[in-house]
Image (cartoon, helix red, strand yellow):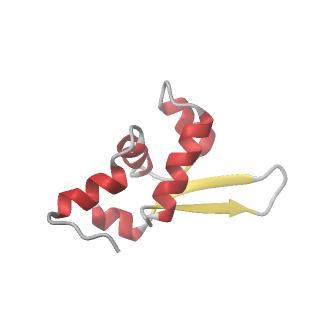
Amino acid sequence: MKQYNLGIEATLEIIGGKWKSLIICLLMSGRKRTSELQRSIPGVSQKVLIQQLRELEKDGIVGRHVYNQMPPKVEYYITEYGITAN
C-alpha cells in the first residue's frame, strides 16, 4: 500500500487526470449518461472519458448504474464517498 506524507498527494493521485475534476463537477448536479458527459466536455474522446470514469469508479468516487434494457443504458453518479472526499 502506498504511503503519502500529505493528504493532498493522495487527492491529486486520484483526481489528477486531465478530465477527472471536470467529470466530478458535472456529476455533482446529478446522474449523467456517458453521452451527456461527452457533450458537456468539449475535446474529450469517448475512449478517454470512459477510461477516466472507470478509474474514478475504481477509486470509489463515482458509481455506475446499468439498467437492464435494450439498448443498454448506463448512468454515472457521485458516490457518498466521492461527496465526502471533495
Residue furthest left in the image: 6
- Quadrant of the image occupied by residue 8: bottom left
| Quadrant for the N terminus in the image | bottom left
Q: Residue at x 37, y 63 (%)?
A: 82
- Examine the rendered structure and indicate whether residue 13 appears above or below residue 85: above
Q: Residue at x 39, y 49 (%)?
A: 24
- Quadrant of the image occupied by residue 46: top right
User: Residue 60: image x %, image y %?
Assistant: 44, 67
User: Residue 35: image x %, image y %?
Assistant: 62, 38
User: Residue 28: image x %, image y %?
Assistant: 39, 52
Q: Is residue 12 left or right of residue 33?
A: left
Q: Residue at x 33, y 63 (%)?
A: 83
Depth order, front residue of 1/18? 1
| Quadrant for the C terminus in the image | bottom left
Residue furthest bottom in the image: 1
Residue furthest top in the image: 43
Q: Residue at x 60, y 54 (%)?
A: 75
- Examine the rendered structure and indicate whether residue 40 appears above or below residue 50: above
Depth order, front residue of 1/56? 1
Residue furthest right in the image: 70
Q: Is residue 56 left or right of residue 82?
A: right
